[in-house]
Amino acid sequence: MNSWSYPLKFSSVAMRILLVTPSYFPIIGGSEVLTQVLATKLNEIGIDADIMTYNMDKKWCPAWKEERIRDGTIDVLRMPGINLLPRLPNPLFSLLRINALPSPVFVKRFRTYDMVHFVGEADLSFPLFSCFADKPRLMHCVGIFRYGGIYRYYTHQRPYLLRLFRRFFAHLADKYLVSSNEEQVLLSDLGIRESKVSILPLGVDINLFRPGVDKKTENLLLFVGRIDRIKGLHTLMEALPLIGSPVQLAIIGSRWDQEYVKEIEAMSQVITKKGIHRVMFLGAMDQKEIVFWYQKASILVCPYLYETHSNVVREALACGTPIASTGSHMSEEGADGILLTSKHPEKLAEAIERLLRNKEMREKYGKEGRAYVERNLSWDSIIKRLVDLYKEMLDN
């Protein structure tokens, strides 16, 4: 086989990659954003990358109709699907992590692509129903956490299903991609051999996410993420009354769990009535809109119950914004701009207050975070490593 360069060539034809994800815009979440970024960056370096997803505008309510639309430079194939039990507990999800059934025609669309890259493991319908497709398949796991997602479900909540899950999960792809060593260890518990796992951190657009030219707004706290219990927003709401300095809290994210949203709104009303702190619900935003808030915020607060770190952590650090987090450090060695705290409201309040009262510490953490992202997480370096992985898989 000929040597590879950027843009890559495969058998004298430009490489074609199909990124497959169960949901895509207008549904907004970490997997959707990651899929869009990967497709955009691959196209920028001359690799033809398209996206396949269910034809749905509301989660797990797909239409039985195939569409092809254009998202900037990306072709998006919206495939037919059906949810047989939209209002009842889905036994297929409990057993196999399947929320909807795709039309069999979707596998035929693989034919013109050199590689199929599945993004996200929360729903396994596309990977499972294409397990016999004659294409190299990469499974990009974006939610492997010890205390959440499929790991907790099969190892703690439904351990009697673990043996079944291990048997089929290990055959869904030729290679599995995670972002950390810890996730690789967790995958081994789910039946994936170490030789089938590659580690690739999630990248950041350091030109888009960068420190602002204006001064930060004093005592502005920021929470970014879907309003869902695992994001721990209630812990932050419980911590606010324990903070002595008056603060503004800006909440950016989709209203994921309606019952939980009502709970959070009720807590915010109680806080607002006391007249010390102010809570703002700003809804979901795209990346360009969120940048403004990253740049203005004094602190990004990540009170997650399950996640260790996410896209918003990387993006905020790239903007020079320090973080108070109940997760873990990005770096095992050296400074990364994150102040760790426990999940207890009292400890979270103490961490926030500590940063608010010490401007020098905030600036120091902000600079450390930006430097870490520039060194390790720019999309240029991440995409090159991803393409090398494509090359390795196609060579084999």
Image (cartoon, helix red, strand yellow):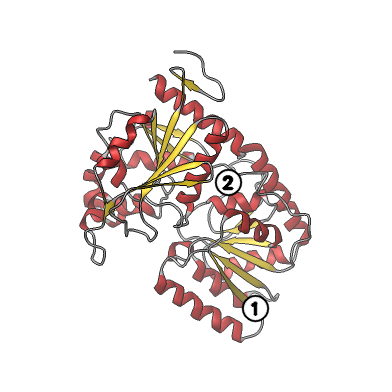
Name the foreground residue: 283 vs 104: 104
Q: Which residue is at 28% across, 52% downward? A: 81
Q: Quadrant of the N terminus?
A: top left
Name the foreground residue: 87 vs 141: 87
What element does badge 2 sit on?
loop
Q: Where residue 2 sits: x, y (%)?
A: 48, 13
What element does badge 1 sit on?
loop
> How many numbered tags mark residues here?
2
Q: Residues within 10 Å of mark 1 (few under 14, many from 20)?
A: some
Whole-Å distance between the Cαs marked 1 and 2? 30 Å
Which numbered disc, 1 or 2, marks the residue that appears first in the sequence? 1
Q: Nearer the viewer, mark 1 or mark 2?
A: 1
Name the foreground residue: 359 vs 176: 176
- Is residue 328 toward the left or the right of residue 247 in the image? left
Name the foreground residue: 285 vs 178: 285
Q: Where residue 264 sits: x, y (%)?
A: 49, 75
Task: Identify residue type, mark 1.
Answer: His
Q: Where residue 129 sits: x, y (%)?
A: 25, 41
Q: Where residue 366 sits: x, y (%)?
A: 71, 52
> Residue at label 1?
277
Figure check: 235 above or below 115: below
> Residue at label 2?
330
Q: Quadrant of the C terminus?
A: top left
